């Protein structure tokens, strides 16, 4: 069964809004954070945790859970928001983000945070770990899925494509890779730094079933996740999600976007006000 909180009937758009708002609140605590990515990927996380994943909020180590791997460790602020919204972490810990001895370090670490399956940070490693997990689950006859959320920048890492080739070779139908394609990485636009296009064709050539969707369209995401879970056969599945950095906060969307979006001290509350004005039911 999918995880729920005390508000089980909340809509997916509202879940995504809650994730965005929590990410901005955490950014305000430290005065920084990868909030541009968090705002952009919030819809993907809402569909993951409140539609697709089998998990138990009160038992994050449940053996039957689907594994959700955050390959992009600097997206931790986004995943923490989803884990808090899902009831895996208490909301009171939001105020400790990035502090000494916090369970919410600025880059995701599995040893610190319930619900954080791997320690990300050395980019390009997540899919390889996901392949190993998927192999292990299959060997144990555990029907759980492994989801790996990675960035478009990681497509420039050779280890990503080695793992993609291994997943197809081993026929890992229990592996779903989600690519957050926001066209940004530390060196600039991903498409200008080292283009991986035509991306669907590349994944398909490696033996994967591929879908490409608007990563900020919840209906399209639900359909893509459902297809990935129910697809017959034993091909690994990729969902390429085209997302908009800073989605949901227009004044941040409108500025020149870079890998690390700088938010001025007075803009955190302004961002929360903008979100509050657009709260879905």
Image (tube, helix red, strand yellow):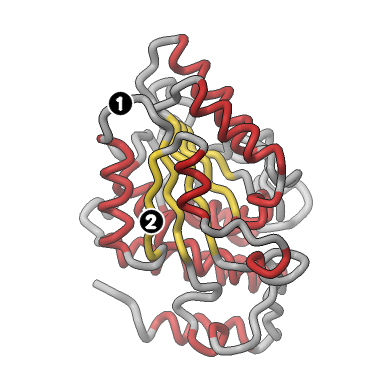
Pick whichever, 264 or 194, lies toward us.
Answer: 194
Horizontal placement of 277 versus 245: left or right? left
Residue 193 visible, this orientation: yes
Q: Quadrant of residue 43?
A: bottom left
User: Quarter of the image containing the C terminus?
Assistant: bottom left
Residue 275 numbered mark, or none: none
Q: In x, y percent, where is residue 44? A: 42, 57
Nearer-N-terminus badge (1/2): 2
Disc 1 to disc 2, how far (Cα)? 27 Å
Q: Is residue 233 left or right of residue 85?
A: left
Q: Is residue 3 visible?
A: no
Up-down relation of residue 111 to residue 137 (above or below):
below
Label 2 CA crowd tier, 10 Å (few <14, some 14–19, many 20+): many
Q: Residue at x 64, y 69 (%)?
A: 27
Residue 161 at x, y = what percent?
63, 39
Secondary structure state at the residue bearing disc 2: helix
Question: In what quadrant of the picture does the N terminus appear?
Answer: top left
State whether residue 219 is above or below residue 278.
above
Which residue does the numbered mark 2 point to in the structure image? 46
Extreme top residue here?
A: 140
Q: Compared with residue 275, is residue 103 higher up or lower down, i.e. above or below?
A: above
Q: Residues within 10 Å of mark 1 (few under 14, many from 20)?
A: few
Q: Nearer the viewer, mark 1 or mark 2?
A: 1
The residue that appears at 40% across and 46% down in the rendered structure is: 210
* Numbered disc 1: secondary structure: loop
| Foreground pick, 8 / 237 | 237
Instruction: Write down the residue under mark 1.
Output: 233
The picture places residue 252, in percent across and down from the top left corner, at 57, 84
Give me the residue at 27% from left, 43% from top.
Answer: 227
């Amino acid at each position: 069964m999918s995880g729920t909180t005390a508000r089980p009937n909340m809509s997916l758009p509202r879940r995504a809004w809650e994730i965005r708002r929590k990410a901005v609140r955490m950014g305000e605590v430290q005065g920084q954070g990868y909030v541009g990515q968090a705002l952009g990927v919030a819809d993907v996380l809402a569909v993951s945790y409140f539609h697709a994943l089998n998990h138990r909020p009160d038992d994050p180590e449940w053996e039957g859970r689907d594994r959700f791997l955050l390959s992009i460790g600097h997206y931790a602020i986004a995943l923490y928001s989803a884990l808090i919204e899902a009831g895996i972490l208490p909301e009171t810990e939001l105020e400790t983000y990035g502090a000494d001895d916090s369970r919410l370090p600025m880059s995701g670490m599995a040893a610190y945070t319930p619900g954080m399956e791997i320690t990300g940070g050395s980019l390009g490693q997540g899919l390889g770990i996901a392949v190993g997990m998927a192999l292990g689950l299959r060997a144990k006859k555990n029907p759980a899925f492994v989801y790996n959320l990675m960035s478009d920048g990681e497509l420039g890492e050779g280890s990503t494509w080695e793992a993609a080739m291994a997943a197809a070779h081993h026929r890992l139908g229990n592996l779903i890779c989600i690519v957050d394609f926001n066209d940004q990485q530390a060196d600039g636009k991903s498409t200008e730094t080292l283009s991986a296009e035509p991306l669907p064709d590349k994944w398909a050539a490696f033996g994967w079933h591929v879908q490409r969707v608007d990563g900020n369209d919840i209906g399209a995401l639900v359909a893509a996740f459902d297809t990935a879970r129910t697809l017959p056969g034993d091909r690994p599945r990729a969902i390429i999600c085209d997302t908009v950095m800073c989605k949901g906060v227009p004044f941040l969307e409108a500025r020149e976007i870079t890998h690390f979006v700088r938010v001025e001290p007075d803009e955190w509350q302004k961002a929360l006000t903008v979100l509050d004005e657009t709260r879905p039911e």
